[in-house]
């Protein structure tokens, strides 16, 4: 079964709001095993919506529409779909009563245009709205099923779960399941090269790569009759990926970020952590503190943007700063050394670099960043060269610091095991 | 001139990422005075992309495409547009060199598939990528102009500003100029209420409001034959806005963020600043350090996530933490008091709160945050109640801290002037 999403709303075309409904619906359709090949956004305009309906009805069986079910004059999704399907509108008494109840329960009076929301296309299947006033509906023709949902995400999502999912499941022939294998420190082209043979020969499951800052995710997606069968198809591919990428994989769980993987590693090893940052200005700490419950592991952080702060808070030597500069291997090393002395934590991460746009020289250009890690006295420093805006250089630096932390802890753990 | 947006990427159709590019491009097109009636999302599939191009090319003059310019096999936007326009691909030597330089500067070697990114359609206008490897381009036919931009938002946005805006402006029959008046601390409905009379009666310039976290921006847009005339239309409206919103306006300059406005205020007053953070975990410091050249003003930051760190690094009293808790007016006050003693700066900002998802109680629910500011000994604490995810609560807290800093410094300066 194929589906297509049409989001109706001039505010989307003006960029005033971001289209989260399309992403939500797409993800849900994929999980239901329904292929969605197109999303379209069109304004509150009858002619243009009719044209879009015409195109979509030819391409897909199910058409999901969001928005335009409100009480105002420019809400015209329902009227236009009814016209397209050759259906008349009628006053749906249960919907009218639901709207009256909704207002009564809030001690408010409906205005005349609210009753417009209870006018529905003949023969439609009504989806009750338990988070607002506009009912949704499914309108069926010989060839298509049109599912109309309200625009506000809170109303759309609840209605989709409660009414559209059971409606669609009755038609759905299969299940789609996917798992993401997350790597860090490799380029997308390198990952793809290592997967070329798998990508070329696989059809089910399929394999696709996605690049993020410093990371490449490999998504394995399988189609099957049941969830169990789909899972069985995915398993050997994920196993193969694990054997090819080894420790460059930080997680095979969709919900685990790099910072969460690092936090989990620290937890399992019983280690605490602290950070000292110059050019990233607190972003490494802030990223780690993204992880709920991190307070058990994360002890303290320093933003030592000035040389004075590096000296005073971390004990970086004046002579080091003078001889090698604030952006140097030596300073990065002393920052992370002082950090552990100061915080009495097991692991320390530090960053010092030139994020730009100014401050670069020929010897030390913008984008030169040193990240360092101290695991119980063993210090590792890594020199990085990043390109891009100030923001991108800082974000790349954060990922580099987290990656270095991860690899140093893994090394520490493997040595501990040999003892 | 009409335009249409096509975002290419199977990850969008699977709902794995939210389509922020469409919103960004729509907003920018509106600001340029170019009407956009449709947005389409299509997967990494040649046949379907060709079909979408056919439909779009009939409806609009300018077609903006994002995504599918990467080095991998499923990146096929450029190839498909070239085929649609009947253009061959050639190896663009400057683009090839830029890719080689990009890798060389990172001490990395490009893989064979990277050179694919330098293969461009004959006769295209190349848009350099200053935030990645994929060049963008404009491909022209008799009837249409196709603008191809990379998918990662950081690359797309920079390239759009640098190359696509000047390219599009050259075809625009009139000049559209807009100026953004940025307010903080007011709700969008309140701003709109105060502007209702202006919004109702104005046609040129037009006035529109945009809500961001903790901020409301008012954009004044004028259409005229010359930039000078457009500017003349905007000026009196901005003046009127200034008289209505006074100090709630932090800038009337599009490029000035709240953190930049705060940094400018500090510079003009000759004040230095430091930060101490609990739930925001370094995000206030990181946000301030977004501002290039901040090192003159920003001295040091502490991430005191644990109670121990609050005591040791900021001198918060054990009795205060025991009696009132870490999330309290008293702790926020002591944090910022200790911060100035420790850093010898003029201004200090501190944040302590419950970002969730766990850790909330009936008395202190998730979203309760205290921000505090110390200007040369004068301490102000503000209690905030935020809603939403952990991330949203933390971001709202950062804005609240910056706003508090701004208003406290303004108060300090007005008192200084009276002396």
Image (cartoon, coloured by chain):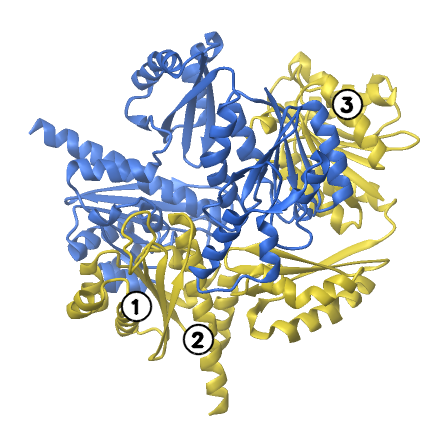
Chain colours: A yellow, B blue
Q: Residue B118 placed where, x, y %?
A: 57, 49
In this view, the residue in front, A298 or B307, is: A298
In this view, the residue in front, B94 or B374, is: B94
Q: Is residue A408 left or right of residue B315?
A: right
Chain containing the residue with disc 1: A
Name the residue located 52 percent from the left edge and 51 percent from the top edge. Answer: B133
In this view, the residue in front, A216 or A254, is: A216
**Residue of label 1:** A332
Classify residue B248 by image quadrant: top left
Name the residue located 21 percent from the left edge and 32 percent from the top edge. Answer: B410
Q: Residue A31 placed where, x, y %?
A: 75, 51
Q: Are the residues flagged by discs 3 and 2 from a single subunit?
A: yes
Query: Can residue A181 be seen at all in this image of the molecule?
Result: no
Q: Separation of disc 1 and disc 2 at Cα?
A: 15 Å
- Residues at marks 1 and 2 touching, judged by CB atoms closer than 8 Å: no
Mark sitting on residue A51? 3
Q: Is residue A271 left or right of residue A81?
A: left
Q: Is residue A175 above or below residue A402?
A: above
Label 1 element class: helix
Mark sitting on residue B32? none
**Of the image marks 3 and 2, the number of the one nearer the N terminus:** 3
Q: Are the residues flagged by discs 1 and 2 from a single subunit?
A: yes
Q: Is residue A263 above or below residue A6?
A: below
Chain containing the residue with disc 3: A
Q: Residue A121 placed where, x, y %?
A: 83, 22
Label 3 element class: helix
Mark sitting on residue A408? 2
């Amino acid at each position: 079964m194929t589906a297509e999403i049409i989001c109706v709303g001039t505010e989307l075309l003006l960029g005033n709001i971001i289209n989260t409904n399309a992403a939500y619906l797409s993800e849900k359709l994929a999980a239901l095993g329904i292929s969605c090949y197109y999303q379209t956004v069109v304004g509150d305009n009858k002619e243009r919506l009719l044209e879009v309906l015409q195109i979509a009805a030819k391409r897909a069986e199910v058409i999901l529409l969001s928005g335009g079910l409100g009480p105002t004059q420019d809400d015209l999704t329902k009227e236009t779909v009814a016209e397209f399907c050759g259906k008349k509108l009628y006053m749906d008494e249960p919907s009218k009563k639901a709207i009256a109840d909704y207002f009564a329960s809030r001690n408010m009076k409906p205005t005349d245009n609210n009753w417009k929301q209870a006018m529905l296309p003949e023969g439609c299947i009504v989806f009750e709205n338990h988070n607002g006033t506009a009912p949704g509906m499914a309108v069926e023709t010989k060839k298509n099923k049109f599912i109309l949902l309200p625009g506000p995400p809170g109303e759309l999502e609840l209605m989709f779960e409660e009414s559209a999912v059971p409606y669609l499941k009755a038609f759905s022939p299969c299940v789609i399941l996917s798992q993401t294998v997350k790597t860090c420190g490799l380029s997308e082209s390198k990952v793809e090269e290592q997967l070329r043979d798998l990508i070329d020969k696989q059809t089910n499951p399929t394999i696709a790569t996605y690049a993020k800052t410093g990371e490449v995710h490999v998504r394995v997606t399988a189609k099957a009759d049941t969830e169990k069968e789909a899972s069985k198809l995915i398993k050997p591919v994920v196993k193969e990926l694990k054997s090819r990428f080894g420790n460059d994989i930080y997680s095979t769980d969709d919900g685990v970020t790099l910072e969460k993987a690092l936090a989990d590693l620290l937890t399992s090893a019983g280690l605490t952590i602290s950070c000292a940052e110059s050019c990233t200005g607190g972003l490494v700490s802030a990223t780690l503190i993204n992880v709920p419950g991190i307070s058990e592991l994360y002890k303290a952080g320093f933003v030592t943007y000035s040389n004075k702060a590096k000296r005073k808070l971390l004990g970086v030597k004046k002579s080091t700063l003078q001889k090698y500069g604030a952006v140097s291997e030596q300073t990065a090393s002393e920052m992370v050394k002082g950090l552990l002395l100061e915080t009495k934590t097991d692991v320390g991460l530090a960053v010092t670099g030139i994020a730009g746009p100014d401050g670069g020289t020929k010897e030390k250009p913008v984008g030169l960043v040193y990240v360092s890690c101290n695991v119980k006295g063993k210090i590792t420093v890594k020199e990085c060269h990043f390109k891009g805006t100030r923001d991108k250089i800082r974000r790349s630096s954060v990922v580099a610091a987290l990656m270095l932390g991860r690899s140093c802890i893994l090394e520490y753990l493997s040595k501990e095991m040999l003892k």
